[in-house]
Image: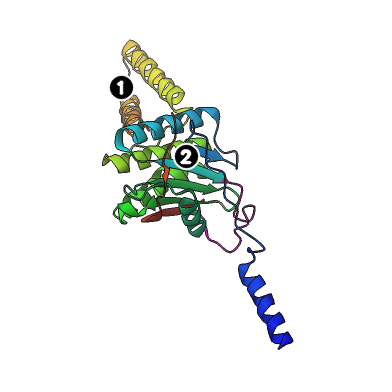
Amino acid sequence: MIRKTVLLAALAFVVAAPPLFAVDFPEKPADTDWYVDMAEMIDANAAQEINKIALDLWVNDDIPVYVVTIPSLVDMGATGLTVEGYATELFDHWGIGSKDRNYGMLLLVSRGDRKARIELGAGWERSHDRAMQQVMDTLIIPKFKEGNYGLGIVDGVRGMNSVARGLALPKPTAPWWFMPLVIAVGLGLVFLIYNLFKTGRSGWAWALIVALAVALFFILRNAGQSSGSGGGFGGGFSGGGGASGSW
């Protein structure tokens, strides 16, 4: 009888005790921010742009979008979770969105695991999985592969914003050297044309000019461009789909 009582007491203790390795979650951001950058992937310019886009989406459409970077799943005590599983638990832990308007969005980036996840609130009903995968594959991951994390995250938030508003996806933002290259090619083209007119030459040189002009046109056409306070925590929960990627 005593042994049975002891065993039942031990079992009750084990069941009631908290898990030995509990999963850690970042603290919710301050009211002025829409991101938490534990992995130090977001510079000052990117942070400003994220806050600007997120605040506008919240004020005008009542849709909260948050960005979270973590060092790795191991660092967060989430060794038994995938990046999808951790994003789901973080989304629910924060309660992004609200029960009545469950349209929250979360972009999670795990730097050490080289994985990213877009998680959506249940209100989206998996209607934007394909669009979010396009955001991941064309706007986020290519920049991450270049090591330009801040720009990739900003482009990702721009893409999520466009999907939420029912707009066409923005093109990837051009790197810093893009405009100097365009200017240099343009000046070279003008100089070449001037010299050809001055010397009266013809033939292959004009073909080269046409080729350079066509190349400049396509460079310009493919140039990337984009077509406050938080408050998006109110009992929302995930389940509306999303997209994942790795680099």
The residue carrying pointer 2 sits among few (fewer than 14), some (14 to 19) or many (20 or more) residues within 10 Å by Cα, namely many
Residue drawn at 60 percent across, 42 percent down: 38
Q: Nearer the viewer, residue 78 or 42?
A: 78
Q: Position of residue 175 (x, y in %)?
A: 46, 31
Q: Position of residue 96 (x, y in %)?
A: 42, 47
Magenta span of residues: 70-82
Whether residues under marks 1 and 2 lie with C-beta atoms below 8 angstroms apart, the answer is no
Q: Nearer the viewer, residue 155 or 184?
A: 155
Residue 50 is covered by the magenta coloring: no
Quarter holding the N terminus is: bottom right
In the picture of the structure, the residue carrying the numbered disc 1 is 202
Query: Can I make out residue 169 in this image?
Result: no
Q: Residue furthest right?
A: 2
What secondary structure is marked by label 2? helix
In the picture of the structure, the residue carrying the numbered disc 2 is 153
Specify which label sits upstream in the sequence, 1 or 2: 2
Q: Nearer the viewer, residue 121 or 225?
A: 121
Residue 128, placed above or below residue 210: below
Horizontal side of residue 221 vs 49, given as left or right: left
Q: Residue furthest top?
A: 198
Say which of marks 1 and 2 sits in front.
Answer: 2
Residue drawn at 37 percent across, 51 percent down: 121
Q: Amino acid at mark 2?
A: Ile
Residue 115, placed above or below residue 35: below
The residue carrying pointer 1 sits among few (fewer than 14), some (14 to 19) or many (20 or more) residues within 10 Å by Cα, namely few
Horizontal side of residue 172 vs 8, given as left or right: left
Give the CA distance from mark 1 to mark 2: 49 Å
Q: Which of the colour schemes (rainbow, by chain, secondary structure, one colour) is used?
A: rainbow
Query: Can I make out residue 103 in this image?
Result: yes
Q: Amino acid at mark 1?
A: Ser
Residue drawn at 36 percent across, 16 percent down: 190
Residue 75 is covered by the magenta coloring: yes
